[in-house]
Amino acid sequence: MKYLSTRGGGFEGGADFLDILLEGLAADGGLAMPETYPQIAPDVLDLWRYLSYPELAAEVIRHFATDIPLVDLRTLVQKTYTSNAFGSYEITPMTSLGGGLQMLGLSEGPTLAFKDMAMQLLGNLFEYALDRTGRRLDILGATSGDTGSAAEYAMRGKHNIRVFMLSPLGRMSAFQTAQMFSLPDANIHNIAVDGVFDDCQDIVKAVSADADFKRLHAIGTVNSINWARVVAQVVYYFRGYFLATSSSDQKVSFSVPSGNFGNICAGHIARMMGLPIDRLVCATNENDVLDEFFRTGVYRVRGAAETHATSSPSMDISKASNFERFVFDLVGRDAKALRALWRQVEDAGRFDLSKSPLFAEISERYGFASGQCSHAERLVTIRSVHADTGMVIDPHTAVAVKVAREHAEQGVPMIVLETAKAAKFNYTIREALGIDAFVPAVYEDLLQRPQRSVTLPAAAAAIKRYIVERA
Ligand SMILES: *Cc1c(COP(=O)(O)O)cnc(C)c1O
């Protein structure tokens, strides 16, 4: 499988999976996309239905990572998707929410959020790729919570990899801070930056823009546009489908709590591969850039001042970085048309497809639907699921449940993707239910564990010096 850039340039001579594994953006600023989507016929689906999670992962990913020998890929996924790391051999357990709704659990991994599903594999893929080439890599990242901890738990103890994770001093929840700062591994560096999250992100951009420094110190990233992360997420759409159906002529729908459009982009890819998905429901919180687009055809990015801090913080985005991948397909993979749209985003902060024939295709051809959910509606949803099932769902999952209920259709199972455990957002659980969320046994003593971090000023020079001194 060869990869191309959504902007039409970037990968000279066509890149393979391992070539783009460690890269962020293509040289032309676009995102990596496979040249074609592998087509999975119904009789193959019938066979895949009976595979274990790691076996299924190998079958899906081998189509996209054709430059990794199959025996190696099998070893990597077997090492990643273990009952030890994900709580049970099912990896992604399914439970019923009643009323035709089911919930696929994606937060059984080490940091209790769905980012583990992809990041755990990424850690093993990085180590494998670096071992093959004898290279080393320093990962520089910025986090306001979930991504940083998922990256650290995936990269801890890996040889030839060090992680430098910037977080805004004193602005993460106690649980998230303890999750990251209590890791004892020598290759993990927690840097509390005296500033806000945007400062952290600006520093990462500034350091990455310094091409000499970046090359000299082999700086890489693990952000949500990484193609391997998207591919790893395709697997559980197949898994969810098999768990909700008994034969491969049935259809299902998915409701996906969305921020950067990475999760639901994987659903789009599964659908393009022939998985019988009826609707892909894009559920947003008050930050409704995506819901607005699917309802009106207008994509309008927001500024920092217009981005709300909500009780589902991992979905508080102002522009959705993976959205470009879907639009690339929507415009018929015409890189020139794509570039024209993104030029409009840069110049005017928006583009408008409401009068284009493409607008109808979004729903009719690609199956997308959408909706949004406010804080008050999250509280109501957490209460109603608790009353109906006894389960305590987290505020992100609550967004998807609320919107799923609006789109559920008779005879088509609606699968809600559960993206975090409630314990990570106990403040909101207390507000909704007046009780504390259940804390899994491995994290019972989390807040008492010794913590390790350094505090540095919000300046790229200070961060560079810190990395250099540790070389
Ligand atoms: C990252 C995250 C999301 C949003 O996923 P995207 O791939 O960015 O759309 C939703 N819920 C939780 C808990 C997350 O950590």
Image (spheres, helix red, strand yellow):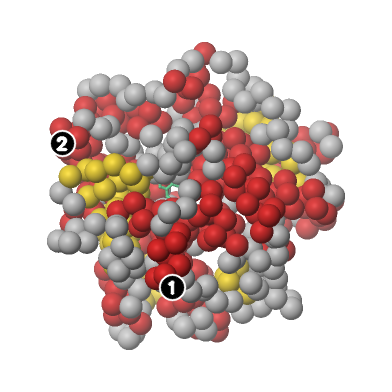
Q: Of circles 1 and 2, which is in front?
A: 1
Residue 380 in the image: x percent, y percent? Answer: 18, 39
Mark 1 lies on a secondary structure that is loop
Residue occupying image coordinates x 72% and y 46%: 127
Crowding near the residue tagged with mark 1, few <14, some 14–19, many ≥20 C-alpha atoms within 10 Å = few
Q: Is residue 313 visible?
A: no
Residue placed under numbered mark 2 in the picture: 388
Quadrant of the rendered image containing residue 425:
top left
Residue occupying image coordinates x 20% and y 38%: 385
Decide: is 205 above or below 426. below
Which mark, residue 41?
1
Residue occupying image coordinates x 15% and y 32%: 387
* Amino acid at pointer 1: Ala
Name the quarter where the N terminus is drawn. bottom right
Residue occupying image coordinates x 34% and y 24%: 438
Residue 216 in the figure: left or right of residue 165: right
Residue 14 in the figure: left or right of residue 403: right
Between 148 and 304, which is closer to the camera in this rendering? 148
Quadrant of the rendered image containing residue 108:
top left
Decide: is 392 above or below 246. above
Decide: is 113 above or below 1. above
Residue 191 in the image: x percent, y percent? Answer: 65, 32
